[in-house]
């Protein structure tokens, strides 16, 4: 009987204490499981495809939320942080259209409306080129602290420039349309 009690206590010590401590750089630190899925759906409505038959500007309407909730399992939030001004920073892995199952990384920043808890002031700051998922995750882990420290701006070092697709010489993020757009051609005259 005593052996059984020691075995049970040992089991709980061995497996019960192995819970990973959640840090302030993880989505789980700020939201419970239901809220996490909802938050990912809100974010991806800004960075992912628009549901078939829906205009780009209507993708944020409540009737389209179900589409993004269903798509949320295709995304992995790698890093997430809320600063003292209630600004949220994120880096996530998203699907990319290609036959090799390559992924993209996306870094962005936003605030939440205090009344509705909907996203305000969203800005997609950068998108990586298509890479293997492990490489996308690694890139986010090594750049996220710098991204947060610089309050959502992203310095384009030569190495980063090779890995970033947006922004580019020809594209920029349009905060009104909430999407990447091509810049006006520069006249050589």
Image: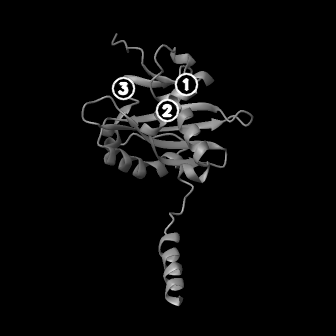
What secondary structure is found at the residue carrying circle 3? loop
* Mark 3 neighbour class, 10 Å CA radius: few under 14, some 14 to 19, many 20 or more: few
| Residue carrying label 1 | 175
**Eyeballing the image, is 185 above or below 22?**
above
Residue 70, numbered circle = 2
| C-beta proximity under 8 Å, tags 2 and 3 | no
The residue sitting at 52% across, 14% down in the picture is: 55
- Chain-order first, disc 1 or disc 2: 2
Image quadrant for the C terminus? top left
* Mark 1 neighbour class, 10 Å CA radius: few under 14, some 14 to 19, many 20 or more: few
- Chain-order first, disc 2 or disc 3: 2
Task: Tell which of 172 and 112 is nearer to you.
Answer: 112
Q: Quadrant of residue 101?
A: top left
- Chain-order first, disc 1 or disc 3: 3
| C-beta proximity under 8 Å, tags 1 and 3 | no
The single residue placed furthest to the left in the displayed view is: 100
The residues tagged by marks 1 and 2 sit, at their Cα atoms, a distance apart of 26 Å
State the image coordinates of residue 175 (x, y, percent, origin top left).
55, 24
Task: Tell which of 17 and 121 is nearer to you.
Answer: 17
Which circle, 2 or 3, is nearer the viewer? 2
The residues tagged by marks 1 and 3 sit, at their Cα atoms, a distance apart of 18 Å
What secondary structure is found at the residue carrying circle 2? helix
Horizontal side, residue 36 vs residue 103: left or right: right
């Amino acid at each position: 009987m005593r052996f059984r009690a020691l075995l049970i206590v040992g089991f709980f010590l061995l497996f019960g204490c192995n819970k990973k401590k959640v840090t302030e750089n993880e989505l789980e630190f700020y939201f419970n499981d239901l809220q996490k899925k909802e938050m990912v759906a809100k974010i991806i409505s800004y960075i992912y495809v628009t549901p078939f038959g829906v205009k780009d500007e209507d993708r944020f309407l409540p009737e389209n939320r179900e589409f993004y909730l269903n798509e949320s399992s295709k995304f992995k939030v790698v890093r997430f942080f809320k600063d003292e001004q209630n600004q949220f920073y994120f880096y996530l892995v998203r699907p990319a259209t290609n036959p090799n199952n390559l992924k993209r990384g996306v870094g962005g920043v936003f605030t939440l409306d205090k009344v509705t808890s909907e996203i305000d002031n969203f800005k997609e700051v950068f998108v990586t080129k298509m890479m293997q998922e492990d490489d996308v995750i690694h890139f986010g882990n090594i750049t996220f602290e710098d991204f947060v420290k610089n309050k959502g701006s992203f310095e384009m070092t030569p190495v980063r420039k090779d890995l970033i697709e947006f922004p580019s010489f020809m594209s920029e993020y349009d905060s009104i349309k909430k999407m990447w757009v091509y810049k006006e051609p520069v006249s050589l005259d």
